[in-house]
Amino acid sequence: MVIGKSSHFSCAANFLRGRKCIFCGSFKVLRTARGYVKCGGCGKTKSLSRLRREIAILQGFYQLQPAYRLAVDLGLDIKVVTRVYQRLREALFHLCELEGGRLKGEIELDEAYFGGRRKGRRGRGAAGKSVVFGLLEREGRVYTKVVESVSAETLMNHIKARTKKGSVYYTDAFRGYRSLKRFGKHHTVSHSKSFVDKRTKNHINGIEGFWSYAKHILYNYRGVSKYHFPMYLKEIEYRFNHRKENVFKQFLQIYFGYVSP
């Protein structure tokens, strides 16, 4: 791993050199004859070679490298890389749910359909696709949820749970949103006519942009199983919501429990 002063990865420099504890941040660490680093602060030990390996894998995760490709590049068993990726994605999934809270202000709502190429109907009603409902706070966060259907009841339940009453909602003309006015102001745009209403300037380009962002990242993995898809989706949600921050630094914190200040 090449680390420069201005690199996103420079926060890991002292960890890689065995000068700083990955768990508590203390500089009171000792190198043992067996190649471990032992912290004089928290008392924990860690194999330095394993630490370097895991940080290298986290760098690959940050750079959106598929596990099989990173395993080849690092000369590791793919199971080792997959184990680190899986552990981090599970943590990100739960963290996103905790961070979600309730969105407020101007909120764009939309559904998207994820899946491989297939013949037949596309969009709403397409068979075999993973259905995702998304809520985007303009100039703020996004929240996503894999749903079984896009019935009005399902959509309203998620809107009620994840938004503050009195917000301003923007949607397309889908009938499932017709009762949305009971939660706040509701503006629609008819995509059969245009993506931005010429008269009212209503649009849902923000959430549509997020769907494009998510599909672009997922394409890099060349196919994700339905079972693992929700965790991949939450990873993308986390990246988007923390796009103005050093996400690699946060991955270190989430995976090891500490991040260099």
Image (tube, grey):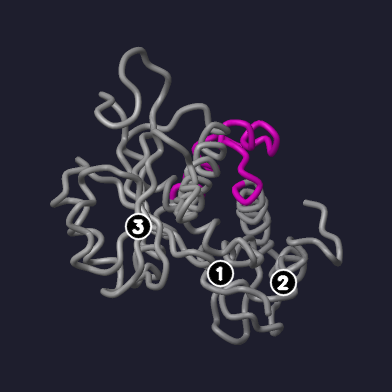
Q: Would you name the residue on which mark 2 appears?
A: 31
Q: Which residue lies furthest to the top in this view?
A: 119
Helix, strand or loop at label 1? It is helix
**Image depth: mark 2 or mark 3 in front:** 3
Amino acid under label 1?
Gln
| Residue found 64% across the figure and 80% down from its top | 25
Above or below for 99 versus 121: below
Identify the image quadrant of the C terminus.
bottom right
> Is residue 34 within the magenta segment?
no
Do the residues bearing badges 2 and 1 touch, measured as CB atoms within 8 Å?
no
Rendering coords of residue 63 (x, y %): 66, 47
Above or below for 96 versus 28: above
Q: Would you name the residue on which mark 3 appears?
A: 187
Amino acid under label 3?
His
Residue 65 can be seen in this image: yes
Do the residues bearing badges 3 and 1 touch, measured as CB atoms within 8 Å?
no
- Dot 1 alpha-carbon crowd within 10 angstroms: few under 14, some 14 to 19, many 20 or more: some
